[in-house]
Amino acid sequence: MSHARTPTSEEALHLTLDMDFEDAVPHVQLEHELADFETVKVTRLDEMIEGMLGEAVERTALLVVCHPEIARDALAIDRTLAGMLPCTTVVYEKQDDDRVHVHHVSATKAIRDLGCCPEGTEATVDDLVELTAERMATVWENIERHADERG
């Protein structure tokens, strides 16, 4: 069965890094923080799954971050939108692939595409999506540039 893909999924950010996973996670975290995203939590999904279910999965980390301007603007639209925050970037390995993958799906695009915004706020949500895209583009550029400098 085929599923329609929304702009949220079509426009997700993805890159690969030629570095060890254990180095990639703090590298990606630092680049978010240097762009004014606060780290809410770093969670190793692989360790949680193995610890709680006894099942091994490939190394996967969730980097949960929040940018103050994005949070402020989302709250100004409607306080319930905070339930769609914060932003999450996943860092993971894939079997038979020696690169580390970094993937981000925009929370603000999800707000827009899921129709979570109150009627009449569509233009303001579009501005929020644009702000998020600008901030995350900076993060993505720096992740790649500084990873290359490390190599």
Image (cartoon, rainbow, N blue to C red):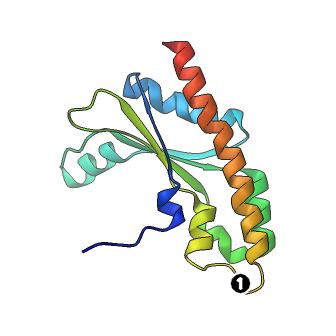
Q: Residue 39's image quarter?
A: top right
Task: Using residue 115 as the reference point, say whether residue 96 is left or right of it.
Answer: left
Q: Nearer the viewer, residue 15 or 40?
A: 15
* Mark 1, secondary structure of its residue: loop
**Amino acid type of the residue that numbered disc 1 sits on in the rendered structure:** Pro
Report the residue at 73% width, 70% height from top. Answer: 125
Q: Residue at x 27, y 38 (%)?
A: 94
| Residue at 74% from the left image edge and 62% from the top image edge | 128
Residue 23 falls in image quadrant:
top left
How many residues crowd mark 1 within 10 Å: few (<14), some (14–19), many (20+)?
A: few
Which percent across, then down, holds residue 54? 18, 49
Give x and y (percent) for residue 121: 77, 79
The number of discs equals 1
Q: At which x and y percent is residue 130?
A: 72, 57
Name the residue furthest bottom. Answer: 119
Image location (x, y in percent) of residue 148: 53, 18
Q: Is residue 93 visible?
A: yes
Residue at point 34% right, 72% down? 3
- Quadrant occupied by the N terminus: bottom left
135 up-or-down from 19: above or below: below
Q: Can residue 78 be seen in this view?
A: no
Q: Mark 1 points at which residue?
A: 118
